[in-house]
Structures are given as C-alpha cells and as structure tokens.
Image: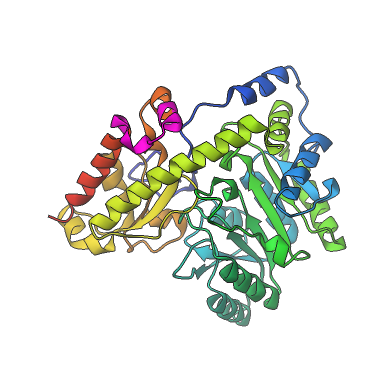
Amino acid sequence: MQRTAEGRGPVRYGPPAPQPGLPVLPELTAVIAAAAERSAPEPPGGGEPVREAACRHWGRRGLPTAPENVAAGPGAPALLLALLGAYGGDVMLPRPCPAWWTPQVRLLGRRAYHVPTPAACGGIPDPYALLETVRRVRAEGGDPRVLLLSVADDPTATVPPPEMLREACEAAGDAGLFVVSDESWRDTVHRPHDTLVLSPAEMLPDQAAVLIDLSGALLPAGWPAAVVRFPGTPRGTWLRARTLDILTATGAMVAGPVAGAAAYALDEPDAVAGRAHAAAALHGAVAAAAHRELLAVGALARPPQAGRHLYADLTPLRAGLARQGVRDAMELEDYLGGRLGAPTPGGQRFADELGALRVRLSTGPLLGATPQERLAALGAPDPLGLPHVRRSLDLLGSVLAGLTS
C-alpha cells in the first residue's frame, strides 16, 4: 500500500481487500487457460453460464434464483456503482465499513450517511440509530433510499447474529430503504458449523439485492468478477435493466476467460470448495491467535468470525503509543505497518473516527513470506506450530508488548 506525505487520503492509496496469500488453484488455472483464446467479453450483465451458475450457488444457500434476476460484472466495485447509480438517492452505511464503499457513493455525487454498529458486531447499523438518522436526514432535506450492509464484515471480521440482522432489516423496511447486502465474505466463515449466516434477501425478499465479489472466497483478486441477485419483482426487473444500462455505458463487462472461471468456481467443485474451506479454517486459526496477542496486552477486538483479518482497538494502549508519537489512526497505521512489515490500515480508511486508535490487521502476511511457506501452513495439522507462523505471531506480540512498558 503506497503512502506519500501529500497523498495519504485519496482513494488510490486506500487499502486493498485482505488476500488469502495462497497460490491459485491448478484447476482454476486450467479453466482460464482453456478459454484464453476467447477474445470477446461477456455481454453486459454476463452470459447464461455464469448467471446460471450463480443461481445454483444461491440455491444451495436457500435463495432460489432465476437467471433473469442476476447480473455479473468485472468486480464488486463496478457492479455496486452501477446498481447505486440505477437506484438513485443517498446511501446509509454502517460505521466502520469497507474502505471502498463510501467512495462509490460519493463518486455518484450522492451523500453517504454512516450509522454506528451494535456493540456485538459490525456490518450492520444499530436499528434504532438507523431510524433516527434517517428521520434526521430527511428532515434536513436528504434523500436516503438505500442501506448497504454486510453479513460477513470487512473490516470487523464479524457475522451479525440472526436476531440483530432481522432487527436491522425491519428498521430498513420501516424506513423504506432498499437493502444491498454485500455477501462476498460469507463463505470465509471460520467455523461454519457454529456460525449461522443469514441474508437480508430471506427477510426482505422484495426489497433486497445480494452482491458477491468472487475474489472474496472463490477467485484470485486479479481475476475480477462479481454477481448480484435482484428481487424477482417488477421493481427488481426494472432495477436490473437500469443496472445493465450503466454497465453497458461504462463498458463494465466480464472478460470471457474470467467468466468461465467464475462459472466454474460458483459451481463449487470439490477442489474449489475444499480450498475455500481449508483457507477459511487456516485464517480462522491464525486470526484467533492474533486476537489472543491483542487481548494479552489489553487491546480490544471483537472475536474474528470470518475473513482474513481482524479489527483492533488500541485505545487502551494510548499512553504507550503517545510515547512513540502516535496520536491518531493515520499515525498508527504507519507505526504498525513499519514494524510488522505489512499493511495495517487505520480505522480512518473504514469511515471510523480518526482519533480512535483502530487498525485492521490481516492474517495473510502471518502465514509466511513465500508461496511454499503459505502452502505448508494450509496443509499443516497445526499451522500455529510451524516456525514461520510462530515467528510472525511472536513479532506481533512483541510489537504490541513494547507499547505497554
């Protein structure tokens, strides 16, 4: 992640999504290589194979879907930009939220209003705060129409409990908001048998769209592809058509070979499903160990439940950080990034308060410095016992301990 004295804030210096740090599956490489001679892009919104594969993907998760209610695009940002542009109005978002959400809203000339999350989780707004914020914004002349949320959250790495998600959805329904649920990290849950993940589309079937960036769990980040599920209603049909108009106007089509790989991954053959499950378990084990290091020095963090990261609040270490010249989240990301040798974006990147000493720590760099080391961690019965993983965790612990002395 680049930093310059004059360019720390612009979007182009923002943090990328946490990466798995693992080599591309050979089976995926074979699929994309077989389609490498295909020069034509997909049609706007994606061809039938990728849309039908997305329908099967959602069907296995209890969301029956028809291909005419699906659109594909070259990554979640392009698809979300088109969807928000099509729907219109201002957007409500949780605080904190993924670093790329707010710029999408502002690029369209819309206003983004951030609502605090519940104490127990991130990804969704507190329902009472949402209703009050919507009331106030409308009284001041704003036009909130959309709520953007996540059921497996970046940056907080949490999964909203079903009852809290339901309350947030009920509040959105009462406020007349259309819900866009980013479910890119849904299949990176660390303990899938112990963590129930629901979708707003189950609770508000006529009033919610579901967005999946396939690089969240299924494809490498360099192969951009995403799918969105629209409600099977006249309003959903209208919204999909308007979204396709914008995708067409902006040339946001999925590359042909990538579409083939996306369809293959969405069908979750054994190799893809096995890698996704193993990677989620590995990142979960390392995230839990990093969480223990944070708690040992008195820092705060919700227990990580999904993804390849965790969100740490180092406010209890403010005195030690101040001795190092660290007084806000921007200085904290530079301090920790320099000592850990890996990006540690501060909370200001995620629409959090600059004065709050919060950072997102990624687990990918803790798996090893080379592809061979990371693959060894993936296949190890006890990855935390590997010397290179232990060294990474020990470094994190020693950097944090240095702030308490």
Q: Quadrant of residue 57?
A: top right
Side of 62 relative to 93 (left or right):
right
Which residue is nearer to you in this view: 314 or 378?
378
Answer whether residue 274 is visible to the viewer in this image.
yes
Q: Is residue 398 left or right of residue 376?
A: left
Q: Which residues are magenta?
A: 375-388
Residue 143 in sight in this render: no
The answer to whether residue 136 is above or below residue 398 is below
Query: Foreground: 201 or 282?
Result: 282
Q: x, y (%) of residue 114? A: 52, 67
Q: Position of residue 387 (x, y in %)?
A: 28, 30
Magenta segment main secondary structure: helix
User: What residue is drawn where x is 59% and y is 46%?
Assistant: 187
Asked which quadrant contains residue 169, the reply is bottom right
Q: Is residue 345 magenta?
A: no
Q: Residue at x 68, y 47 (%)?
A: 79
Which residue corresponds to the image point at 59% horizontal and 78% vertical from the top-left?
131
In the depicted view, which residue is nearer to us: 11 or 211?
211
Residue 377 magenta-highlighted? yes
Q: Quadrant of the C terminus?
A: bottom left
Count of numbered labels shown in the rendering: 0
Residue 312 % position (x, y):
35, 56
Q: Is residue 283 above or below residue 200?
A: above
| Rendered image quadrant of residue 101 | bottom right
Position of the N terminus by quadrant: top left
